[in-house]
Image (cartoon, rainbow, N blue to C red):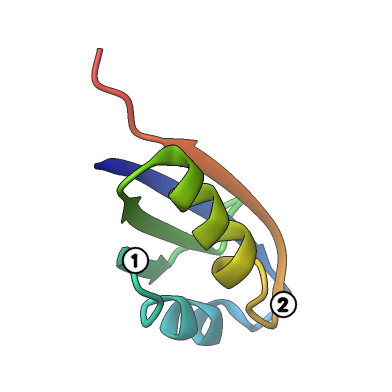
């Protein structure tokens, strides 16, 4: 199982709506609107890195109101 944090920037005033939509995507563990340089932080999981990448590109990045994403895979060193 691969997990990652997805840091999202949105259009002004769209953070809450974006978080609500993303929270319903299969594989998303948690989606919260936050303050700071990013507007939404998502914790997601998939069976492989490739599946995680497909989920981000096919589902997350297509949500209306998103301007930029940064995916940060969780590593256990």
Residue 12: assigned label: 2
Quadrant housing residue 8: bottom right
Rendered location of residue 21, percent (x, y): 47, 85
Q: Residue tagged by mark 1?
A: 28
Q: Is residue 41 left or right of residue 38?
A: left
Rendered location of residue 40, percent (x, y): 50, 64
Q: Is residue 67 visible?
A: yes
Mark 1 or 2: in front is 1
* Disc 1: CA contacts within 10 A as few (<14), some (14-19) or many (>=20): many
Q: Quadrant of the C terminus?
A: top left
Give the answer, above or below, for where 44 lies relative to 25. Answer: above
| Secondary structure of residue under mark 1 | strand
Quadrant housing residue 66: bottom right
Precedes in sequence: disc 1 or disc 2: 2
Q: Is residue 21 left or right of residue 61?
A: left
Find the residue positioned furthest to the top: 77
Q: Is residue 35 visible?
A: no
Who's the residue at 56% across and 64% down the image? 39
Rendered location of residue 3, percent (x, y): 32, 44
Residue 53: assigned label: none
Give the answer, above or below, for where 7 lies relative to 1. Answer: below
Seen from the viewer's position, the closer of residues 44 and 49 is: 49
Q: Quadrant of the N terminus?
A: top left
* Disc 1 to disc 2, C-alpha distance: 23 Å
């Amino acid at each position: 199982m691969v997990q990652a944090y997805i840091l999202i920037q949105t259009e002004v005033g769209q953070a809450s709506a974006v978080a609500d939509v993303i929270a319903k995507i299969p594989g998303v563990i948690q989606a919260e609107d936050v303050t700071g340089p990013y507007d939404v932080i998502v914790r997601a999981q998939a069976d492989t890195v490739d599946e995680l990448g497909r989920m981000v590109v096919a589902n997350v990045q297509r949500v209306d109101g998103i301007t930029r994403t940064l995916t940060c895979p969780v590593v256990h060193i």
